[in-house]
Amino acid sequence: MSDKPERFIDDEGLRLDGRRVDEIRPMKVEMGVLSRADGSCYLEWGNNKVLAAVYGPRELHPRRMQKPNEVLVRYKYNMASFSVEDRIRPGPSRRSTEISKVSGEAFEPVVMTQYYPGAVIDVFAEVLQADAGTRTAAINAATLALADAGIPMKGLVSACAVGKVDGQLVLDLNKPEDNYGQADLPVAMTQDGEITLLQMDGHLTPEELEEGLEMVKKGCQQILEIQREALVSRYGNEDEEGEEAEEESPEEVPEPEEEEDEERDNSFDNEESEAENSDENDVTEEDEGEEDERQ
Ligand code: UDP
């Protein structure tokens, strides 16, 4: 890990990477990059490189995990072992489990879950190169992958972090700012400004928190524009899209796929696939106990 810089902001008000305090890093988005996923998005943000893939809606097995009145959205954040300076151990960690949970919840207010009762939508966010802000980069890619998969949503989710270095608030922390700064506040919000994820490391005064949230809102608005442009360039005119969306009645929303492709379920939890392969209706108490232990 690089050493702590003496200063993060110079006399001109510029940060180590040349940005002003309220500037986000350059972002590049490419949609529909994976032919076997129902929706996908590759996103670069500064030196972060993230791939999001969406599978579903499809029938959820084992059936006991189904939600009778809505679809289950599962989100899995994973950092590739080669994505960071010091190789990280492959597989889930405490950190990735936490990020997966809160990031999945960040989509709850926007995904129209009522259309697919009993089904599941799997969102995989793979960090290929990490340089601070990977959870927010992953959310920005995931929302586009969900849109690419045609999942009905009330709007997009945009995410960005704000933090504090040298006693000053800065938008979209870079790696040294994230590692050595005084605070890091990743936030996700809907396009209406409703906050759907808020975490915090470090310390901010109530006034700084308020100011920081205003800053991050502006950052999210800029990201929303980039996301909209990506959608428009893939799917055409924004107005036409709006008209289509209005015309679409709930009955016209596509049915969830039947489970026909078990191999594709390179799933979240191996135990689910195991249960599925044995006999989904034949889950004994013993099996359930084992599953609980492994969770
Ligand atoms: N990082 C790392 N190894 C880890 C976790 C994180 O090198 O096991 C780096 C990585 O560059 C990441 C940054 O530290 O982007 C900040 O991590 P944090 O947990 O704050 O999450 P993020 O800002 O990426 O959402």
Image (cartoon, rainbow, N blue to C red):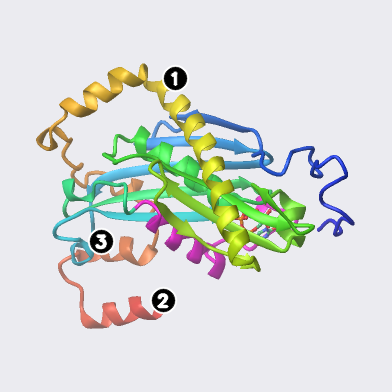
* Segment colored magenta: 81-107
| Quadrant observed for ligand 1 in the rendered image | bottom right
Work out which quarter of the rendered image holds the C terminus and state it: bottom left
Question: Where's residue 283, x and y in %?
Answer: 20, 73
Labelled pair 2, 1 in contact (Cβ < 8 Å):
no
The answer to which quarter of the image holds residue 256 is top left
Q: Is residue 124 above or below residue 253?
A: below
Residue at 38%, 63% in the rendered image:
270
Of the numbered discs in the image, which one, if any, rests on residue 264?
Answer: none
Secondary structure of the residue carrying tag 1 is helix
| Residue picked out by circle 1 | 233
| Residue picked out by circle 2 | 294
Question: Where's residue 20, x and y in %?
Answer: 74, 39
Of the numbered discs in the image, which one, if any, rests on residue 276?
Answer: 3
The first of marks 1 and 3 along the sequence is: 1
Q: Residue flagged by tag 3: what amino acid is it?
A: Glu
Measured Cα–Cα span from mark 2 to mark 1: 44 Å
59 and 177: which is toward the camera: 177
